[in-house]
Amino acid sequence: MKKTLFLLFSLVFLVSCNENGDKTEERILSDSSGNINQITLIIENELWEGPVGEAIRDNFAAMVEGLPQEEPLFSLSQIPPETFSGFVRKNRSFISVQEGKEAEARIIKDLYARPQTGAIISGESEEELIHIINESSEKMVSAFKETEMKEKQRRMKKSLKKDGKLEEKFGLSLDFPSAYRYALEEEDFVWIRKEIPKGNMEILIYEVPISQIEADTNTIGNIIKMRDSIGKAHIPGPTEGTHMITEEAYAPYLFETEIDGKFAYETRGTWEVKGAFMAGPFLNYAIKDEANNRYLVVEGFVFSPSRGKRDNMFEIDAILQSADIE
């Protein structure tokens, strides 16, 4: 454990360098591959099936916050070290775990392909490996999330819908694929929809005065009131008198973040229809636009009963994070 303390739980972000480390070495790398949010684990079978593997799963396949059912943060695919060669090395995200070596936790970029994020974890014993995994996983998860988000946005840019409607209404640029269509357009509200098997993916854009969210210190309560008023006004349920609300049984998660360099509240939780049996996950960004004395709200939610929604919500997140306010 002394060597673990010597390490270093600040991760080292590396670029491709020569052996002396004093010059950047130019290399020709092929394109990386792999499904979004999938990580390849290079680890011996015995370690994967024991406590070390359990620590990896606890940290990298933890439950995604804000989804109605349990779904992993990343899909993990394990292979033994001797098979990590050839095309497998092109996988965009990988973690290499090695026992019997000096304690280490670092992130490397574009080692075998581009873009690529790899994490190297080593330790002299299983106990040391588990400690390093638990201490360093937060930064590693952030690095993998960033890589996957950029890749998802890159893929979406191949077929963007461009019509200028959001710029005209809200002074907003939002990158969303042409598979989405406008479901409802009003003076101060836009609803965009993509149909998926047995469900829909929805995006809402609207604005509220800064004072509506900052009326008092109960920020989450004010955001819930805002969402519920929008649901009542614009998002009807399947029968007369029903409409979308924020799930009443559990409070949503609230975070502070930035979108387009501006302060924003990020809210994740579950929506439901008041008076009907319908529910699903939502993600809401309330972006503070002081120049226009408003919070510009971009929100997405999914309805897809009895199906996984992680990847749907990740696509919505990639769209919402592309917001650019003029």
Image (cartoon, rainbow, N blue to C red):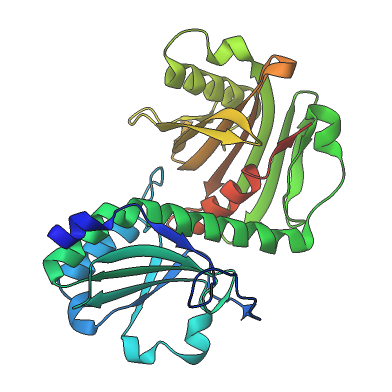
Quadrant position of the N terminus in the picture:
bottom left
Identify the residue shown where x is 36% and y is 29%.
251
Say which of 252 and 85 sits in front: 85
- Whether residue 261 appears in this view of the structure is yes
- Whether residue 63 appears in this view of the structure is no
- The quadrant holding residue 153 is bottom right
Does residue 262 appear to the left or right of 54 in the view shown? Answer: right
- In percent of width and height, residue 130 lies at 19, 63
- Total numbered labels: 0
Does residue 182 appear to the left or right of 321 in the view shown? Answer: right
Instruction: Note whether 263 is above or below 20 in the view shown.
Output: above
Identify the residue shown where x is 37% and y is 63%.
106
- In percent of width and height, residue 9 lies at 29, 53
Say which of 88 and 125 sits in front: 125
Identify the residue shown where x is 78% and y is 28%.
170
Identify the residue shown where x is 46% and y is 67%.
108
- The quadrant holding residue 240 is top right
- In percent of width and height, residue 4 lies at 19, 59
- In percent of width and height, residue 162 lies at 84, 49
Quadrant position of the C terminus in the picture:
top right
